[in-house]
Image (cartoon, rainbow, N blue to C red):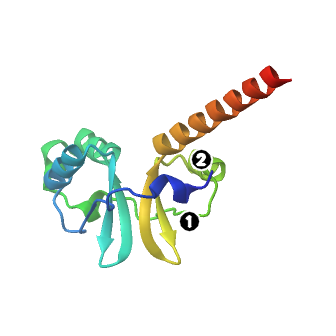
Amino acid sequence: MIVGRLIRGRSPVVSVSPDTDIRRVADILVEHRIGAVLVMQGASIAGVLSERDIVRCISERGDEALRKSAADLMTRDVETTTPHETVDRAMGHMTRRRIRHLPVLDDGELVGIVSIGDLVKARIEEAEREAESLKDYIKQA
């Protein structure tokens, strides 16, 4: 299975600008029931900001964290994938890099984002389909 199949038909990617304050980012994460947002500078990805980044900053800086901006807390070195990448390869890449969200670019244009949860779910569904196919094959033999 390829990553492009996972993002087909999804809602647009939720993003914020670099100057969005952290309190607003937290509200957006809750509102959309997501674990991260892309921080966009125009059409370019400036960074990724996750719940984990926010919690870490609150732990280190207390209330001061809520006065920070997305640009202050975001991860700037953003890894990406393409719609043509296999789920297994994308999972391996995310596991090696210890990241949970992977923007999907097609010819440099943002077309979606996948989480490690999306990839694990897709892989489990694929394994279940394969197991059912094998069971059907054995029954027919």
74 in relation to 111, above or below: above
- Residue identifier under label 2: 91
Expressed as whole percent of the image width and height from the top left, the position of residue 57 reads 27, 46
Expressed as whole percent of the image width and height from the top left, the position of residue 136 reads 73, 26
Residue 130 falls in image quadrant: top right
Q: Which residue lies furthest to the right in this view?
A: 141
Res 82 label: 1
53 in relation to 111, above or below: above
| Mark 2 closeness class: few <14, some 14–19, many ≥20 residues within 10 Å | many
Say which amino acid is labelled 1: Thr
Expressed as whole percent of the image width and height from the top left, the position of residue 96 reads 61, 47
- Quadrant of the drawing holding the C terminus: top right
Residue 101 visible, this angle: no
* Residue depicted at 49% across the width and 52% down the height: 6
> Going by the image, does 94 lie left or right of 60?
right
Please report whichever mark, 2 or 1, sits nearer to the chain's N-terminal start. Answer: 1
* Most foreground residue, 107 or 125: 125
Residue 58 falls in image quadrant: top left
Residue 39 falls in image quadrant: bottom left
